[in-house]
Image (cartoon, grey):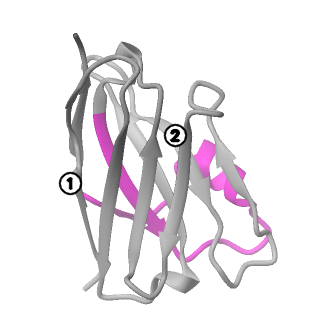
Amino acid sequence: QLQLVESGGGLVQPGGSLRLSCAASGFTLDYYAIGWFRQAPGKERERVSCASSTDSTDGSTYYADSVKGRFTISRDNAKNMVYLQMNSLIPEDTAVYYCAADRGHPGITVQAMCVLNEFASWGQGTQVTVSS
């Protein structure tokens, strides 16, 4: 059974950093596109960053404009782990962060998958609070 479990959230001051982790089990991460999404109180879930599978011809990484230059998505296929390094955090980054994975769709780029929330498997989320 495919499972994703996030960790690493917490309270951080503005300007600080956090690294979120997502442990994947029940499938081989290499063949899956990965993504991070977030949902703030009273707001819809929004995309943060997505990356194509290791075997994809797409081979791209997508970042929302609001996090570009501050966040970095990465994966360790050997450990079946997904990460989101978050630097220069601001209060607007406060949200529950979700890890997602999907086998992908022929002809659809990872950017489109990210924009359209086309991910089938989701974790339970981890809270990130940026406050002084």
The amino acid on which the numbered mark 2 sits, given as a three-letter code, is Val
For residue 47, side relative to residue 111 (left or right): left
Q: Which residue is pictured at 42% across the width and 59% down the height?
A: 83
Q: Which residues are magenta?
A: 96-124
Query: Which image quadrant for residue 103?
Result: bottom right
Q: Report x, y in % for residue 41.
A: 25, 20
Element under disc 1: loop
Which dot marks residue 124?
Answer: 1
Q: Which image quarter holds the C terminus?
A: top left
Asked whether the viewer can see residue 97, the reply is: yes
Vertical side of 28 occupied by 58: above or below: above
Comes first in the chain, label 2 or label 1: 2
Q: Which residue is pictured at 23% across the width and 50% down the height?
A: 8
Q: Which residue is mark 2?
A: 48
Element under disc 2: strand
Asked whether the viewer can see residue 120, the reply is: no
User: Would you call the spot at circle 1 few (<14 residues within 10 Å), some (14-19), or many (20 or more)?
Assistant: some
Q: Is 74 colored magenta in this rendering?
A: no
Q: Is 102 colored magenta in this rendering?
A: yes
Give the alpha-carbon distance from disc 2 to disc 1, as whole Å: 16 Å
Q: Nearer the viewer, residue 16 or 39?
A: 16
Give the farthest residue toward the front: 16
For residue 129, side relative to residue 70 (left or right): left
Q: Report x, y in % for residue 37.
A: 43, 43
